[in-house]
Amino acid sequence: MKAVRNTVAVGSSLMLLAASMIGQLESSGRMLLTSYQDAGGVWTICDGITKGVTPGMTVTPEWCARAKAGEIEAHSQPLATVPYQLPGHVILAMTDLCYNVGTGACASSTAMRQLKANKREQACDAILLFKFSMVRNQRADCSKSSSGCYGIWTRRQIERSLCRNELTPAQAKLLFKDLPLGGLE
């Protein structure tokens, strides 16, 4: 039996797509080489890297590319537990979700449970359950346009559509381009 590999490997064409798509979404396509606090107060650098980032940190574009590849590969790891081969569009959508909400939340989510049970349509729909965020130290329902985080809801809708193969990765990237920095408004 052939081994199933649902993760995004460094150097793969799926990695290039994921890096381009996630980078566009996390920073509106801008490469920020000095650390800053995102809308949630998390220290961030490059186009969405948070691991190990400290105030005043400065990096090179090459550092950003290596860090981004490692982060995407790491955030695709929950998909390695799915016992059957997933199509690329599902891997991309779920990797973006895991990148945005964290691997712990992603791995224990309804979406992952549905994927493991081979209920792909329900798994894609379950992406929309991740609609809450902290805004000004209060839990906000991002599906409400007045929430201050509506961009997150838009991101979830794009992820769901990509997961269900209603959008191509190129179409998803174009839609991501129009979202505000980090998916927050």
Image (tube, helix red, strand yellow):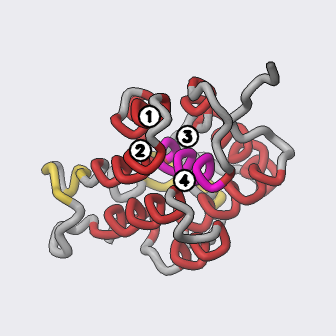
Q: Mark 3: few, some, or many residues within 10 Å (few <14, many ≥20)? A: some
- Which of the 4 quarters of the picture holds residue 53? top right
The residue at which mark 4 appears reads as 93
Q: Position of residue 100 (x, y in %)?
A: 46, 48
Closer to the chain start, of discs 1 and 3, is 3
**From where the camera sits, is residue 45 visible?**
no
Q: Position of residue 1 (x, y in %)?
A: 80, 19
The residue at which mark 2 appears reads as 123
- Frontmost residue, 100 versus 35: 100
Give the overall secondary structure of the magenta segment.
Answer: helix
**Vertical relation: 20 (above or below) 1:** below
Closer to the chain start, of discs 3 and 2, is 3
At mark 1, the secondary structure is helix
The amino acid type of the residue labelled 2 equals Ala
Q: Disc 4 and disc 1: Cα gap in Å?
A: 12 Å
The amino acid type of the residue labelled 1 equals Met
- Frontmost residue, 123 versus 148: 123
